[in-house]
């Protein structure tokens, strides 16, 4: 697992810590650390004989857990999912997942919108089969709530309307599919650029996870504007 900016490594710190030493460094009871272990929130400790030792990565992860729990008010289950994203794909994707979590409740008229599939079909004036087709194509973005129910957001209502209008104008669904494919390639390049140019700087500055997320939102807002402007320029130029 990669290191986060939440806790900076110190070469003077011991690389291997017993649980009481770890608890002292992070200011957290040993029983809490053991509980996080049982919940799968921490990487397995290094066993030497019958003694468990913890590394700097455990310090980092405990810092992330504390910030997400105390400052973002996330459940342990949500934190576990974010940590799994970090373990598999790195810090950038974890930030993206955290941002996406904040965007899931799109505010329309002051109301947070979470729609079941049937309600989305009604509002979008399409069939459930059509929704399933668009989900398979990656053109709608459902998520599961804590009960495992598949839900959609106001963004999906807007996307349905856009797809319908494009088809009414005579453009096939293949066009949004192509745009999605190209944007997927673009986002991979963006993530690589973030990891190379932004994360090291933010680590040096010691930004918290919340501060990093705010920076990501600023950068992505600029990227969105850049993409929109270049798209229009290239379209008319071509």
Image: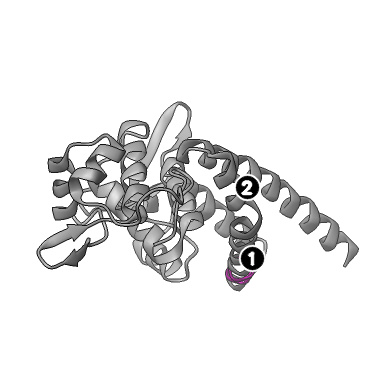
Residue 143 in view, yes or no: no
Q: For the residue carrying disc 2, how many other residues have a C-alpha within 10 Å: few (<14), some (14-19), or many (20+)? A: few
Quadrant showing the C terminus: bottom right
**Magenta stretch?**
177-182
Q: How far apart, in angstroms, are the residues tagged by discs 1 and 2?
A: 18 Å
- Is 180 magenta? The answer is yes
Residue occupying image coordinates x 22% and y 58%: 53
Quadrant showing the N terminus: bottom left
Q: What residue sits right under mark 2 in the picture?
A: 201
Q: What residue sits right under mark 1 in the picture?
A: 189
The quarter holding residue 30 reads: top left
Residue 208: x and y, percent? Answer: 48, 38
- Is 59 magenta? The answer is no
Q: Nearer the viewer, mark 1 or mark 2?
A: 2
Q: What secondary structure is found at the residue carrying circle 1?
A: helix
Q: Is residue 110 left or right of residue 47?
A: right
Residue 67: x and y, percent? Answer: 36, 37
Residue occupying image coordinates x 48% and y 33%: 108
Residue occupying image coordinates x 28% and y 52%: 80
């Amino acid at each position: 697992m990669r290191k986060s900016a939440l806790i900076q490594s110190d070469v003077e710190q011991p690389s291997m810590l017993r649980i009481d030493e770890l608890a002292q460094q992070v200011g957290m009871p040993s029983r809490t650390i053991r509980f996080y272990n049982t919940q799968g929130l921490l990487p397995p400790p290094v066993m030497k004989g019958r003694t468990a030792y913890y590394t700097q990565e455990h310090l980092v992860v405990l810092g992330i857990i504390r910030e997400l729990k105390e400052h973002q008010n996330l459940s342990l289950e949500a934190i576990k999912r974010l940590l799994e994203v970090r373990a598999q794909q790195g810090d950038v994707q974890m930030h993206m997942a955290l941002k996406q979590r904040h965007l899931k409740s799109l505010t329309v008229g002051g109301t947070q919108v979470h729609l079941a599939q049937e309600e989305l079909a009604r509002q979008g004036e399409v069939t459930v089969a059509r929704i399933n087709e668009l989900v398979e194509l990656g053109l709608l973005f459902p998520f599961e709530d804590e009960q495992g129910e598949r839900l959609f957001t106001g963004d999906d209502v807007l996307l349905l309307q856009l797809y319908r209008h494009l088809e009414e104008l005579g453009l096939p669904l293949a066009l949004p599919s192509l745009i999605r494919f190209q944007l997927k390639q673009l986002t991979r390049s963006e993530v690589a650029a973030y990891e190379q140019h932004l994360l090291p700087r933010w680590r040096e500055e010691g930004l918290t996870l919340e501060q990093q997320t705010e920076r990501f939102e600023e950068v992505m807002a600029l990227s969105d504007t850049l993409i929109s402007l270049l798209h229009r320029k290239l379209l008319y130029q071509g």
